[in-house]
Image: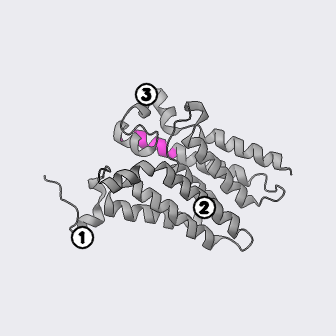
Amino acid sequence: MSLALFTFKLLAAYLLGSVSGSLVLGRFRGVDIRTQGSGNAGGTNAFRTQGAWFALGTVLIDVGKGALAAGLGFWPPEVAGVPPLAQALACGLACALGHIWPVFFGFRGGKGAAVVVGMVAVCLPAALLPLVGVWLLLLTFTGYVGLSTVAAALSLVPSAWWLASAADRTLQTGIAIAVAALVAYTHRANLVRLARGTEHRFEGVRLLARLRGLAPRRRV
């Protein structure tokens, strides 16, 4: 099977990624969340501006398209010189690029984290637990969504290296590094605000910090 098919799969994954969950749902509600809150089309801004159910729908669509794009990479399984898993990871990355720079929405989308979760669930399911675990641990301790997301993406690199076969290790780890770098890049503003001490913090989710007496208690 020729590399032309692999190229087609990458293009299809990018176009699938361009179907942004929050922007599609926003069309039904008559809102564009890029004009509200942080201006981002991701799940966090959807939650802040439109509520939990809207955010849940957004995340489900974005995780689902990441999983679907990765599945597209596995079928058909043989492309000259490109192993099936590498195809799936590359298609997941292409989907994340489409989510961040969607051709259907003026190249202004989300940050790609939910798409990465969908990709990992299909390509590296054993890496999903440490990825989600790192995210939850940091979120419930610090309350910073952006920091937690970047750290979780970085955890994908050692997981990908550990889970790869000797033949696939270099390529698989390289794609994981690219994904982690992409997530860090899309969250660069969060990291800058964090360094300046102006990053938004969800105090309500700081359960671990509260148990240790580090987070302020809400007054009743």
Identify which residue is drawn at 57% across, 47% down. Answer: 64
Location of mark 3 (residue) = 29
- Residue 173: x, y in percent? 64, 65
Which mark lies nearer to you, 1 or 3? Answer: 1
Looking at the rendered structure, the secondary structure element under dot 3 is helix
Q: Is residue 141 above or below residue 57?
A: below
Q: Is residue 158 left or right of residue 30?
A: right
Residue 43 at what x, y percent from top left?
Answer: 44, 44
The residue singled out by tag 1 in the image is 212
How many tags in the picture? 3
86 in the magenta segment: no
Residue in the foreground of this view, choosing between 124 and 186? 186
| Amino acid on which disc 2 is placed | Ala
Q: Residue furthest left?
A: 220
Which residue is label 2 attached to?
176
Which numbered dot is residue 196?
none
CA distance for labels 2 and 3: 36 Å
Q: Position of residue 82 (x, y in %)?
A: 78, 58
Determine the residue located farthest toward the top in the rendered image.
30
Q: x, y (%) of residue 112?
A: 53, 48
